[in-house]
């Protein structure tokens, strides 16, 4: 969809977490402007070819689609640091299967900035050829970046692929979203083929220890803040 | 038409044993039964068109029974390397319903036993145990009764040449129903394969009356590249002309809705006065509602049952058995009983609501009284004023025996992909040979070589422009150029995915005790209540806890979704909050729509209409305008601070929904600020914040431009990018074509956490390879399926320069029905941001209230 390119200024949402001012971008990325830091989660690159290996020949364009969205995002914000919050590759061989153009795209993204791969359960050991730095987790000030959420204060995690389903007037709308209670946040998956898990799944209540959290829902042209309890 | 002359009048062709058997029963062989026998002797394929009750099935099997009574053709004794066998099948019978196959097997037992014929009959359906299926492949019966899916499976096995090389005859039952869907495409491809495997093969098609018999005649024989070959045609004597009436209600006719509640007492009275009545309705929710209401007034405690596709199978069987045993006085049913087993003693058919199509109505009427010489009786019960018009023209159409069955299909490319993979599973094939064979199937006779090659590429490596999947190929070419299955897993996966029926994701509905203020995801809901049936997942997705809907004949309250079960509790509400779900909604046929428009345009013909309806139309003529036959009237009027825009295309709900989506986009661009729309079978109403009437008055909005066919260009493209209906269509194609397995072998997907979503695949593919063969298949479906694009485009051409605008100060009589749909039906429009914003607003409101 062209929502990102067409996103008017102001479509993004100020987002305060553990006392830090962040911006939730309509594309599903998180921006820490003071640090010029950009965070994306669950890119799941080469998910298509991962299925193809097992005979499900999904279109092989998912990596290109994900990387071109990421490129536009990076061009727009020109961050000093990019954190990929784990599950950047759909499986351990994911990076090996990347096409030449996609490798070039990653190299171009990394040029002139710090690039951090956080290890995820799908890609516990990102190979050195992928460039950048690989770490298990990372703390900056009061914020902690890791793939799998633990519920810790100031934690920004991914892994669960939150999505919100809002039903109204006999119609249901399903969208990716951030889930946060102001102290911790779970980011939406950024990957083109990454599916979603409803924020009403018990996994989320376990992290937030209640349903008193909100969904920052990625709409077509703007973000919407909706109570988790309002979603289904 | 060939062959009318050589039909024997006397039963010469019938062996003595058969003549005796008929005589012992006091029967005389019917003319068409003997005609089919003569066709078989002449080794001709034939289409039999006969009304229900004409002994169609016996006619179809008589040639085979006569063949086999005489010991069958010589040379069927063969050594197969598996021991001596009598050989393969003699006759294959294919029906759309497995229940029908089982029923026919039972019916054939009698003549075979009574004439002591050396004939073995067996069925093979999805329910047949594996051991019997294996035995059938080694020691096939003489006659096998089966379904299109089972035929595809048999053809994909390496036993296929052994099983089918001696096949003499294929009998295709309910052919008119089979050919209208992708199942018909799959069957046509299977048939083309059979013609290659069995050089002696002829076919018999059994069909109800259709608009274009020649299409069915082509379907039955292999097509050559130059002239269209056709099977011979045998038409049985028509039965007595049915007696069809419209209920002359004493009550006030409703303006809108489909419940026909007003006529409830009259319907009940009809059931009471007849022995057994079938009450057809168009949707499951209507069936639910009517059933419930009938029991509310069932003072005589008449045995009235309910039958529809989402009821528990066991419960449906119970109803069918009670029906067959004559224990029921009435059955409220949907199209689930359109086809199928003979029930015997039904003396009245009631059709509640719109008939939708003339042929459909005639087939339903035919369910009453299976004795040919007596007329079937039917009563039509229109549920609102527009439906009165539709019932009137449908009755005229029945009197003229005018048919409106759908036109011939173009074979679908996703089905072809499935077939190609099946062929590779059976044996290696050469592309050139398969291309020729496939074009012998009538729906694929015009298939281009490019499309065929694209499909083969798709089956092999996905058919992507980016050639990165060569190493993952499912089929590969060997040195001789023959395509072979790349590994045994491909075969396994084909078998698990065969078929063209993509079930909606269904959820089980369980009746539980009501929530009593418990906490947690399911609260204090008790588990283990009674199972009511199954419901489409997408319907449940639109509900929030506390919403009520009608299911299993009662109003229930949605409580929670637990695993794959929907928990509902009893509700005291008399009206369901969420009224309908889509199961079984057909659009009004083009033919009836045209007749309704002509009826409206012809004021003299209004005399045949009930007073209430005539008054309504007369008022419309006075206050606004009654549309002419090829005219489209657009009305605008203010109401409740909004500006309404109502038009009357009469093209059915699906086409109207698509039109609504496209018009709202255009109105948005014209800054009319549309908020939403509703559509019914006849009209479309859009409401806007902007003053549409003034915009038209001041020529800021040009109606000819608004309805210009170019909306099917860029606007359509934009909408298709995000249309949920298009995504559903794509998903079906992805599954049928074998791109995405129905189920993963050896891999359970976690409930509610989908491995990947076809919507995401659609987005990516559309952007990176817009002409991919699967997208082409989905587009072809969209032309006739959920989006009804072809009909929309025909309509736009028809109304060009025939648009009349009426600038009104209030709602017109004709607009009342569609206006009343607002609030009853889901509001359409893809403006998700607005709906999300609404939900966000609630948060703000709640927060303010808490503070």
Image: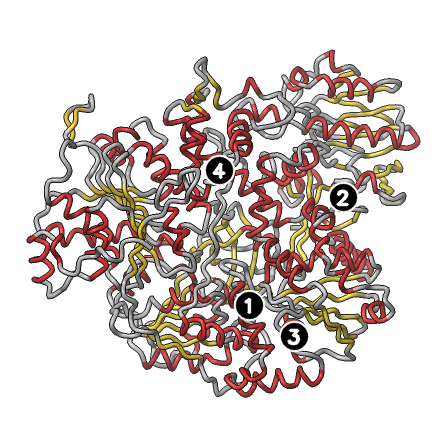
Q: Chain of mark 1?
A: B
For the residues tagged 1 and 2, is the chain the same? Answer: no
Q: Which residue is mark 3?
A: B627
The residue located at (51%, 48%) in the rendering is B504
Q: Comparing marks 4 and 3, which lies closer to the viewer? A: 3
The residue identified by callout 4 is B742
Q: Are marks 2 and 3 in contact (CB under 8 Å)?
A: no
**Is the C-beta separation of discs 1 and 4 under 8 Å?**
no
Q: Quadrant of the N terminus of chain B?
A: bottom left
Q: Residue at x 50, y 58 (%)?
A: B583
Query: Dot 2 corresponds to which residue?
Result: A218
Q: Residue B246's x, y, as percent?
A: 44, 79
Q: Secondary structure at mark 2?
A: strand
Q: Tell me residue B402's x, y (percent).
A: 43, 67
Q: Please tell me if label 4 and label 3 are on a single chain.
A: yes
Q: CA distance from mark 4 to mark 3?
A: 48 Å
* Cβ–Cβ under 8 Å for marks 3 and 1: no
Q: Nearer the viewer, mark 1 or mark 2?
A: 1
Q: Is residue B821 left or right of residue B370?
A: right
């Amino acid at each position: 969809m062209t929502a990102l390119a067409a996103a008017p200024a102001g479509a993004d949402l100020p987002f305060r977490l553990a006392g830090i001012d962040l911006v939730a971008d309509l594309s599903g990325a998180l921006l820490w402007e003071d640090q010029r830091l950009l965070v994306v989660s669950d890119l799941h690159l080469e998910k298509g070819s991962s299925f193809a290996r097992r005979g499900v020949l999904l279109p092989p364009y998912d990596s290109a689609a994900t990387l071109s969205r990421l490129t536009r995002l990076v061009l727009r914000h020109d961050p000093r640091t990019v954190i990929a919050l784990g599950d950047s590759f759909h499986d351990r061989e994911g990076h090996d299967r990347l096409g030449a153009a996609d490798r070039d795209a990653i190299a171009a993204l990394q040029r002139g900035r710090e690039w951090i791969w956080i290890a995820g359960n799908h890609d516990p050991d990102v190979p050195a050829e992928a460039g950048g730095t690989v770490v298990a987790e990372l703390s900056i000030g009061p914020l902690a970046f890791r793939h799998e959420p633990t519920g810790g204060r100031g934690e920004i995690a991914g892994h669960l692929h939150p999505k919100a389903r809002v039903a109204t007037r006999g119609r249901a709308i399903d969208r990716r979203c951030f889930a946060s209670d102001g102290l911790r946040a779970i980011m939406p998956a950024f990957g083109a083929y990454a599916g979603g898990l409803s924020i009403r799944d018990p996994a989320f209540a376990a992290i937030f220890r209640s349903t008193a959290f909100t969904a920052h829902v990625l709409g077509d042209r703007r973000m919407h803040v909706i109570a988790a309890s309002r979603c289904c | 038409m060939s062959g009318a002359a050589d039909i024997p009048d006397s039963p010469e062709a019938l062996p003595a044993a058969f003549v005796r058997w008929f005589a012992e029963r006091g029967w005389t062989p019917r003319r068409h039964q003997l005609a089919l026998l003569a066709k078989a002797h002449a080794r001709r394929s034939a289409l039999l068109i006969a009304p229900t009750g004409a002994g169609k099935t016996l006619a179809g099997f008589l040639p085979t029974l006569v063949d086999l009574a005489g010991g069958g053709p010589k040379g069927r004794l063969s050594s197969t390397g598996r021991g001596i066998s009598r050989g393969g099948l003699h006759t294959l019978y294919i029906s759309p319903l497995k229940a029908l196959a089982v029923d026919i097997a039972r019916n054939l037992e009698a003549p075979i036993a009574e004439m002591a014929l050396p004939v073995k009959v067996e069925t093979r359906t999805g329910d047949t145990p594996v051991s019997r299926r294996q035995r059938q492949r080694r020691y096939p019966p003489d006659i096998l009764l089966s379904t299109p899916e089972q035929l595809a499976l048999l053809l994909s096995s390496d036993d296929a040449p052994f099983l089918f090389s001696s096949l003499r005859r294929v009998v295709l039952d309910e052919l008119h129903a089979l050919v209208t869907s992708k199942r018909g495409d799959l069957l046509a491809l299977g048939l083309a394969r059979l013609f290659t495997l069995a050089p002696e093969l002829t076919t018999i098609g059994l069909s109800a009356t259709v608009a274009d018999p020649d299409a069915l005649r082509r379907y039955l024989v292999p097509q050559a590249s130059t002239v269209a070959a056709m099977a011979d045609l045998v038409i049985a004597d028509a039965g007595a002309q049915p007696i069809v009436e419209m209920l002359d209600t004493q009550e006030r006719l409703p303006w809108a809705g489909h419940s026909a509640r007003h006529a409830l007492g009259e319907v009940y009275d009809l059931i009471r006065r007849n022995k057994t009545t079938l009450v057809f309705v168009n949707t499951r929710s209507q069936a639910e509602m009517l059933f419930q209401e009938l029991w509310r007034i069932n003072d005589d405690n008449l045995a009235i049952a309910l039958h529809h596709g989402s009821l528990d199978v066991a419960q449906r069987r119970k109803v069918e058995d009670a029906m067959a045993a004559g224990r029921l006085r009435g059955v409220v049913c949907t199209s689930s009983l359109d086809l199928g087993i003979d029930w015997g003693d039904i003396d009245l058919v009631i059709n509640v609501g719109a008939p939708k199509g003339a042929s459909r109505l005639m087939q339903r009427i035919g369910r009453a009284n299976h004795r040919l010489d007596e007329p079937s009786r039917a009563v039509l019960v229109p549920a609102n004023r527009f439906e009165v018009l539709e019932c009137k023209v449908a009755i005229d159409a029945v009197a003229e025996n005018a048919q409106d069955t759908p036109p011939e299909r173009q074979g679908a490319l996703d089905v072809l992909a499935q077939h190609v993979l099946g062929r590779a599973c059976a044996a290696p094939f050469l592309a050139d040979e398969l291309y020729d064979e496939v074009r012998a199937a009538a729906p694929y006779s015009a298939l281009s070589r490019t499309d065929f090659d694209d499909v083969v590429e798709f089956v092999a490596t996905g058919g992507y422009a980016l050639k990165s999947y060569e190493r993952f190929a499912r089929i590969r070419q060997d040195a001789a150029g023959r395509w072979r299955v790349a590994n045994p897993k491909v075969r396994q996966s084909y078998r698990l995915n065969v078929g063209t029926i993509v079930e909606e994701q269904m959820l089980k509905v369980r009746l539980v005790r009501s929530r009593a203020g418990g906490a947690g995801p399911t609260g204090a809901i008790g588990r283990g209540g009674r199972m009511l049936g199954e419901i489409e997942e997408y319907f449940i997705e639109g509900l929030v806890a506390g919403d009520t809907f009608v299911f299993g004949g009662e109003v229930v309250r949605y409580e929670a979704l637990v695993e794959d079960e929907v928990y509902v509790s009893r509700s005291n509400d008399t009206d369901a909050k969420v009224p309908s779900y889509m199961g079984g909604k057909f659009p009004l046929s083009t033919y009836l729509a045209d007749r309704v428009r002509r009826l409206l345009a012809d004021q003299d013909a209004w005399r045949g209409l009930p007073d209430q309806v005539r008054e309504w139309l007369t008022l419309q003529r006075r206050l606004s305008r009654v549309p002419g036959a090829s005219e489209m009237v657009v009305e605008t009027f203010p109401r409740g601070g909004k500006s309404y825009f109502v038009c009357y295309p009469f093209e059915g709900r699906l086409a109207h929904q698509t039109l609504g989506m496209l018009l709202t986009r255009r109105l948005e661009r014209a800054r009319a600020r549309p908020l939403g729309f509703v559509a019914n079978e006849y009209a479309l109403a859009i409401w806007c914040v902007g003053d549409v009437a003034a915009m038209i008055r001041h020529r800021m909005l040009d109606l000819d431009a608004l309805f210009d066919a170019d909306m099917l260009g860029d606007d359509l493209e934009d909408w298709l990018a995000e249309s949920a209906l298009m995504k559903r269509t794509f998903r079906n194609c992805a599954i049928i074509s074998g791109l995405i397995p129905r189920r993963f072998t050896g891999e359970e997907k976690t409930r509610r956490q989908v491995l990947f979503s076809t919507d995401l695949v659609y987005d990516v593919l559309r952007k990176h390879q817009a002409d991919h063969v699967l997208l082409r298949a989905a587009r072809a479906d969209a032309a006739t399926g959920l989006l009804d694009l072809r009909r929309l485009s025909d309509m736009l051409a028809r109304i060009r320069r025939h648009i009349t605008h009426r600038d009104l100060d209030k709602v017109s009589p004709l607009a009342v029905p569609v206006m009343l749909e607002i609030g009853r039906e889901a509001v359409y429009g893809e403006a998700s941001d607005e709906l999300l914003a609404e939900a966000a607003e609630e948060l703000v409101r709640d927060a303010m209230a808490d503070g």
